[in-house]
Amino acid sequence: MNIVDMMLALRRLILAIAGALSWLGPTLARWTVGWIFVLSGWGKLHNLERVIGYFGELASRMPSCRRHSSPGSSSSTARSC
């Protein structure tokens, strides 16, 4: 067996392994994003009073923004927040 045949055999082996593991990259990405969402949601779930307080704080800091969501407000007179 000469060197060219060995290189072609190695290439076929590498491509076969890469083809068999092509599912691994997307799966790891999905697991990583899922884990981040789980940790984020877990923190919000166990600190619910703090999260509610934060959103209440946001509303009191920008009272003009609440006016835009009220019915009957004209978009031409509404200021951006």
Image: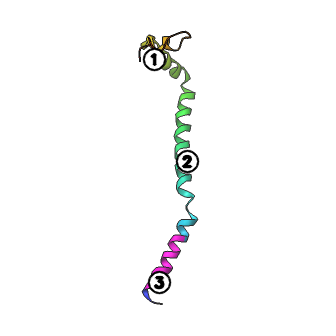
Q: Residue at x 43, y 86 (%)?
A: 3
Residue 30 marker: 2
- Whether tag 1 and tag 2 are in contact, CB under 8 A, the answer is no
Q: Name the residue under label 1.
A: 58
Picture coordinates of residue 73 (x, y %)?
A: 51, 10
Q: Name the residue under label 3.
A: 6
- Secondary structure state at the residue bearing disc 1: helix
State the predominant SS element of the stretch in magenta: helix
Q: Give the range drawn in magenta.
A: 4-15
Is residue 35 placed above or below 20 in the rendered structure? above
Q: Quadrant of residue 79?
A: top left
Q: Alpha carbon of mark 2 to alpha carbon of mark 3: how far?
A: 37 Å
Queried whether the magenta region covers residue 13, the answer comes back as yes
Along the polypeptide, which appears first: circle 2 or circle 3? Answer: 3
Picture coordinates of residue 39 (x, y %)?
A: 53, 37
Amino acid of disc 2: Arg
Q: Alpha carbon of mark 1 to alpha carbon of mark 3: how far?
A: 66 Å
Queried whether the magenta region covers residue 30, the answer comes back as no
